[in-house]
Amino acid sequence: MVMSFYTKRIEFPSLDNSKPTTHVNKFGYNTAIGSSYEVISDLGTDPLPTTAAAVSIVSSSSDDASAGVGAQTVEVQGLDASYNLQTSIVTMTGTSAATTGSDTYLRVFRMKVLTAGTNETNVGNITASIGGTDIARISADAGQTLMGIYTVPANHTAFFKKFQVSISKNQEATVQLRTKTFNNGAWQVKGQFGTFAAAVGYDYVVPLRIEEKTDIQFRAKAGATSEMGVVFDLLLQRF
């Protein structure tokens, strides 16, 4: 008897080398992950505004001001009302709120201190809010947000390559990679991983294809309150 075999061609999502491609590295940290899921970020939450508005930025220290010893200017990175990439530079005014002015944001996924006085970074916690809801925070002396989140800009496709999550204690933990599509899409788990007192990660041989305007989020829970961090990489390609 003769056995015949055939292989069906499988087309994997791949990058088009003729199109502009950029690398995005994101990292987050949460100092108090408990028994219920929390986002791996400075705030532990991931509010998603429904209307774009100016970002209000304020510090817990008066030293974070244009002539102070702490943070003097801060860069805000995110998406505008049409999900286009946008960056703003804000001059700090201490414990009084400064804003991004005419630059309105629907998403903020990174902030960092650009210039500082003799302290060489921010003295206090710098908090950003939209419509009275806190959306991002640069913890004191950190100089940058630690946000395990991202949103794919309009007219771009993201190819999610790999991640690693760490835990500070000898405890079990569960980690979820979730996405939420544009226009009232539901959160969906794209990967769930368990670990005990060790880092957990995955390198996707075939990168996950994530469409434009999709929110990406890492969250976790642990057997006892623990510090947990995440780092992930994706390639962003314009179409």
Image: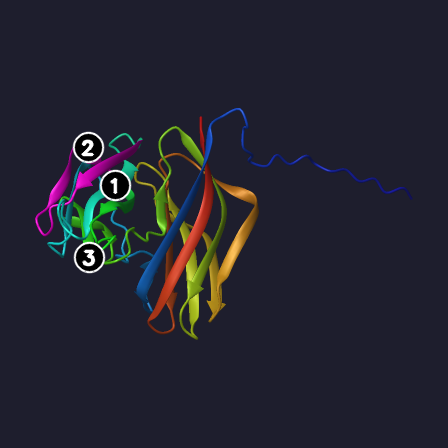
Q: Are marks 1 and 2 in contact (CB under 8 Å)?
A: yes
Q: Kindly identify the amino acid type of the residue bearing the numbered disc 2.
A: Asp
194 to 62, vertically: above or below = below
Q: Is residue 208 magenta?
A: no
Q: Distance of mark 2 from mark 3, alpha carbons?
A: 26 Å
Of the numbered discs 2 and 3, the one sitting upstream in the chain is: 2
74 to 139, vertically: above or below = above
Name the residue tied to disc 1: 76
Of the numbered discs 1 and 2, the one sitting upstream in the chain is: 1
Name the residue tied to disc 2: 103
Q: Main secondary structure of the magenta part?
A: strand
**Start-end of magenta stretch:** 85-107
* Nearer-the-camera pick, 62 or 22: 62
The residue mark sitting in front, 2 or 3, is 3
142 to 211, vertically: above or below = below
Q: Distance of mark 1 from mark 2, alpha carbons?
A: 10 Å
Q: Kindly identify the amino acid type of the residue bearing the numbered disc 1.
A: Val
Of the numbered discs 3 and 1, the one sitting upstream in the chain is: 1
Residue 18 placement, left or right of 69: right
Secondary element under disc 1, as helix, strand or loop, is: strand
Name the residue tied to disc 3: 123
Expressed as whole percent of the image width and height from the top left, the position of residue 26 reads: 39, 48
Q: Kindly identify the amino acid type of the residue bearing the numbered disc 3.
A: Val
* Nearer-the-camera pick, 117 or 53: 117
Placement of the N terminus among the 4 image quadrants: top right
